[in-house]
Image (cartoon, grey):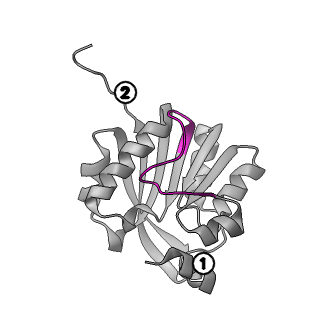
Amino acid sequence: MDWNKEYQTGGYRVWHTGKVSAELVAIVTVFQPERVLDVGAGIGTEVKYLQEMGIDTVGLDISLEACRTNLLVCGTALKLPFFEERFDLVTDRGLFHHLVKTEAYEYVSEVFRVLTKHGRLLLRVARSMIDEKILWDVFSSRFNIKVSSFTSQFGAGEVEMYMLIGEKREIRNCGT
């Protein structure tokens, strides 16, 4: 998909509602993160909301057009341009389900790397675009996860989604 074209022509309106998701509001209320990374931030709706809440938030997108228009960091979720253990929460509303399986493992490694010791991941993916088993296969080695289903309102209508909330696991080296 040509993400720059999607943002230049307005194609993004199919999936962006311009509204903050209820699940993000809930997780921020419960866990009260200090620093948040929104990967695949798009038009930056959730980034702006978190910043208005006084939370240090960075939005990242691969589309130069989206980054320029919405003051986001331009980059890929497969090689996050941030130091280790920088964020308490990483949020993703619709990027992960565009990755192939090999990229999914790279994504998990990068998210794990930038999360603080007890950091959390809030992932929302379209059920029609991914198998729940893949979520378990890819995330369970690095995160304590809970997966649930819900319906979300998008520009094109209601979409069945999976929501994964992952708490970073402590990984120990056996030889040290």
149 relative to 84 in the view: left or right: left
Circle number at residue 99: none
Image x and y of residue 144, in percent: 35, 38
Image x and y of residue 139, in percent: 32, 47
**How busy is the neighbourhood of tag 1: few (under 14 within 10 Å), some, or many (20 plus)?**
some
The answer to whether residue 146 is visible is no
- The type of residue carrying mark 2 is Glu
Total labels drawn:
2
129 relative to 41 in the view: left or right: left
Task: Identify the mark nearer the N-term, 1 or 2.
Answer: 1
Residue found 60% across the figure and 62% down from its top: 21
57 part of magenta stretch: no
Which stretch appears magenta? 73-89
The answer to whether residue 157 is visible is yes
| Quadrant for the N terminus in the image | bottom left
- Identify whether 159 is placed above or below 84: below
Image x and y of residue 56, in percent: 69, 43
Q: Which residue is mark 1?
A: 7
Q: Residue furthest top?
A: 176
Residue found 35% across the figure and 64% down from its top: 99
Residue found 36% across the figure and 43% down from its top: 109
Most frequent secondary structure within the magenta stretch: loop
Provide the secondary structure element on which disc 1 rests: helix
84 part of magenta stretch: yes
Q: Which residue is mark 2?
A: 170
Residue 31 quadrant: top right
**How busy is the neighbourhood of tag 2: few (under 14 within 10 Å), some, or many (20 plus)?**
few
Residue found 62% across the figure and 38% down from its top: 33
Depth check, front residue: 131 or 105: 105
Provide the secondary structure element on which disc 2 rests: loop
Image x and y of residue 19, in percent: 66, 68
- Identify whether 14 is placed above or below 38: below
